Image (tube, rainbow, N blue to C red):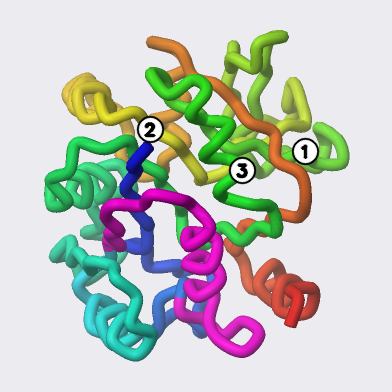
Amino acid sequence: MAVSIILLAAGYATRLYPLTKDRPKALLPLGQGVMLDEVIRSVKEIPDVRHQVLVTNHRFAGQFKAWQRARGVPIQIVDDGTDAADRRLGAIRDLELARTRMGAPDDLVVVGTDNLFTWSLADFVARAQRHRTDPTIALWQAESPAAATQFGVVIRDADSRITAFVEKSPQPPSAEVALCVYYFPSTIGSQIAAFLASGGNADAPGYFIEWLVRTGTVYGALMPGAWYDIGTLATYEQVVQAWPR
């Protein structure tokens, strides 16, 4: 079944300054290349990919285009036109911009480019396609609820349907963390439009997932292996040391 890929890379990563003052987070060094190389490696495992789009801001669009030319990756770079953090569109508006520019009526695999993981993205897609008329999000098992306080966490029923989504609670109801790795059916555009029309917060994708859980059916796929959310200098330094070379 054909799918299309959207990579979210339009943030300004101010928490990683000075590293990201003049360079996007996804192009920070990692191993023999940059973080984005690892994301693309995982995307290449997915069979029958029709289109690939990376959405970024205007400040860093040129760097991503240079990366694309150097790597020869068949991906479209979409510039969202913003040039400062206080003028950003937000992840959900960037997602919708990429989706409409793509123009393909495919199911979507959406990945935040500051997510690094050692499990197979192709396995996630295969699991998500069992529920392909509804969204599926990738999950990671934290050591304990106390270790998940900085993330969105979910509660699932016996069929893996998400029954609750709680964002950054000081007392999370579970240790299953929601990642910025999503499988969206081709009909997701109508739900994005409804979310934005309702005044939903477009800044972080977790707000949209929380709304989807509240208004419809969303499944969760708990993935094995390591996951890193590159949100701080400390986390970036940790992944540089731990990532396989």
Q: Left or right: 163 with respect to 5? A: right
Whichever of callouts 3 and 2 sits on the residue coming sooner in the sequence is 3
The structure residue drawn at horizontal position 47% and vertical position 24%, both measured from the top left corner, is 210
Asked whether 102 or 189 is in front, the reply is 102
Assign the C terminus to one quadrant of the image: bottom right
Q: Which residues are magenta?
A: 27-55
* Element class at badge 3: helix
Q: CA distance from mark 1 to mark 3?
A: 17 Å
Closer to viewer: mark 1 or mark 2: 2
Badge 2 crowding class, 10 Å Cα cut-off, few under 14, some 14 to 19, many 20 or more, is many
Mark 3 lies on residue: 123
Asked whether 147 or 180 is in front, the reply is 180
Q: Left or right: 228 with respect to 126? A: right
* Percent position of residue 162, x then y: 59, 17
Mark 1 lies on residue: 141
Mark 2 lies on residue: 184
* Percent position of residue 76, x then y: 22, 66
Query: Which picture quadrant has residue 143?
Result: top right
The structure residue drawn at horizontal position 28% and vertical position 65%, both measured from the top left corner, is 56
